[in-house]
Amino acid sequence: MNNSSAAEFTALTGNTVWRQRMAEIYDRITKPTRAGKLTASRFAAECAIEKARRGQVLTAAETSLVELATRLPALHGSLNAEGQNRLGDALEAALVGDQTIAGLLHLVYTAGLQKARGFDVEFAGLSAAAPFDLLIRRDGAEAEIACDTISAEEGRAVHRGAWMQLADRIDPDLQTWLAAHPGRYLLKMTLPHGLKAEADTLPALHSRINAMLASAKRADYDEAAVLRLDPLLLAGAQATDAKLNPSNILAKLRREFGPEAHFAVTEAGGSLFVMAARGAAENEVAGAVRRRLAAIAPARLTGTRPGILAMFIDDTDQLEWRILREQLLLEGEARQFLTFPEARTVIAVSCASRFELVNAGAPEGDLRFRNPMHPAAKSVGLAPAVVSTV
């Protein structure tokens, strides 16, 4: 995306609106906090567009994101007046608060995938206010595609955003405590009810950890949390290395605690304090996707044509996304959904993440799961859009 293309996009949003939006985002991501880093990843597309607008060098991933954004002004120009208004409203809503433009990028990404597979694509949701987003046609066959976004946070017991906020809150206290108690420590937390950024949850847990440290207790537990403080024990040369690399420590701990655990490291001089937390149960990101599929299918598909539910799973990292794919967690939940009465009109489910948007995910551009019970399951015309990828 060159400067002029970026200018077309920002003109579509409104230049004043865009500048205000980027000021809000930069105010959040430039803070030297864990939450700021997480926010930067969430607004990666917006930041990439701004870099392009300023003529700065882009990474390959940023180039992919802004290329998708380039399609929105072109799409706007191809729509009727009502469709342009609907796209404008959707874009306006995506530039408020914690909302992002990722869902709109997934829409144009999905349309591009289907065009590349030989389909004619109509943005029926925008142009005709259809409940679904895209109408695709090929060799006399038609299908409706409803694009939907779900955050991986909905399936996590311990929300990543809440964890980052907790770590930022308690970090200054831990640095003070480490100054008086030099060494290497590991605070293990099991949170049976999980952790969310609710009004009283984070302050209460923060105060509880501080009270535990102040009283020199090694353990504290109730129905809300089980806390245990131990020396941080590392094997071999790591045990005597005065300059331990936090990345190496976290890699070791992740192997011990599993991919669902959350970690935070506080350093003070040569001392370290590591917090590790997880819920009492495994994450259910794929289960949250299944529940979302069952909720939207009756409302988003008309039933007059085969329907495809194209899910965009946001706020996931590479490790989590690889596990969801390679351990067939998404496939299992999608296929379970396809046996539900709500899936009667669904011919296939597809799943993608930000990694697919930047060409770093599933080789075919999405994960697809065909419903073998749908009357059109063996349609030759629809095959490129519905045949299972696994």
Image (cartoon, rainbow, N blue to C red):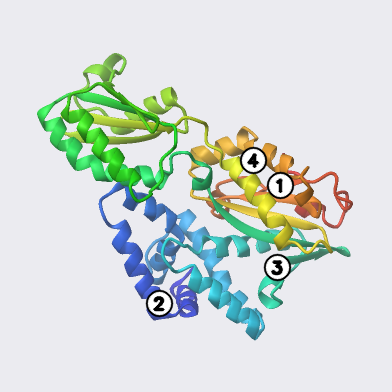
Residue beneath label 2, please? 17
- What element does badge 4 sit on? helix
Query: Image point 71% across, 56% down: which residue?
Result: 297
The residue positioned farthest toward the top in the image shown = 236
- The circle drawn on residue 357 is none
Report the residue at 64% width, 79% height from top.
83
Rendered location of residue 118, percent (x, y)? 77, 61
Q: Nearer the viewer, residue 243 or 28?
A: 28
Kindly identify the amino acid type of the residue bearing the numbered disc 3. Pro
Q: How many marks?
A: 4
Q: Is residue 361 above or below residue 50?
A: above
Q: Pointer 4 and pointer 3: residues touching (CB < 8 Å)?
A: no
Q: Earlier in the sequence, mark 2 or mark 1?
A: 2
Classed neighbour count for the residue bearing mark 4: other residues with Cα under 10 Å, few (<14), some (14–19), many (≥20): many
Q: CA distance from mark 4 to mark 2?
A: 37 Å
Q: Measure how far apart labels 4 and 3 are at the Cα level.
A: 25 Å
In front: 343, or 323? 343
Q: CA distance from mark 4 to mark 1?
A: 10 Å
What residue sits right under mark 4 in the picture?
330
* Residue that carries the numbered disc 3 in the rendered image: 131
